Image (cartoon, grey):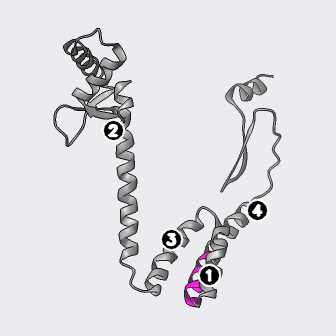
Amino acid sequence: MALKKLGGSAQMKDICILAKAYIGEDSSAEKVENNVRRVIYTHPKLFCRVEGKDEGWWQLNTHRDEIASLKSQIAERDGVIERYKNIRTEDDFIKMLLPELMEAYKYERKALNPFRLILRNKGYDSAAKVLDAFIKEKDEELVKALQKLADKPSVQVEVKAGAQAQISKEGITNLLPKDQDNDEHQD
């Protein structure tokens, strides 16, 4: 509890000072420090040394994981910032923006429409055309995939409670849980 109150990492002396405040003035500093050390050393899943600091520093393992995650996010954002710092002209920005927009298409096609309008309104017609061609190609791929499914002979499936239907390249299949499937074949 003391280590959490100290922000997840602290020096042993600070942990002991706060622990003593929790325990009360009746305990000697040596006794408190021995108890704190015993708890830390016997629970390696909860506590670990702080990397890059003196030996007296300890942290909660959850704090270490949070720090690692935050460092990763910071490094990722630093990379993005560096890329944007290196943009010299608006044309360079557009060249960098197009691949990002194409990646965004995977998640939501409609999200690209405002960007297409902005590109056109700002006079970047060639960039807008590249984006339009990319979208058209992806839309055509989707239409072809749907057409393949539609060209399959229709399959009539009786769906019962608990049954699942699956659509694939081969068509629609009816998947029943094993116990239901076996029950039907025994009748």
Name the residue: 28% across, 33% down. 10
Task: Find disc 2 in the rendering and name its residue.
Answer: 64
Label 2 SS? helix
Q: Amino acid at mark 3?
A: Glu
Q: Residues within 10 Å of mark 2 (few under 14, many from 20)?
A: some
* Contact flag, marks 1 and 4 (Cβ < 8 Å): no
Total marks placed: 4
Q: Quadrant of residue 66?
A: top left
Q: Position of residue 39 (x, y in %)?
A: 29, 18
Task: Find disc 3 in the rendering and name its residue.
Answer: 100
Extent of the magenta region: 124-135
Q: Nearer the viewer, mark 2 or mark 3?
A: 2
Per the model, the C-alpha gap separating discs 1 and 2 is 43 Å
Relative height, residue 134 to residue 55 (above, below):
below
Between 168 and 6, the one nearer to me in the picture? 6
Name the residue: 40% across, 67% down. 80
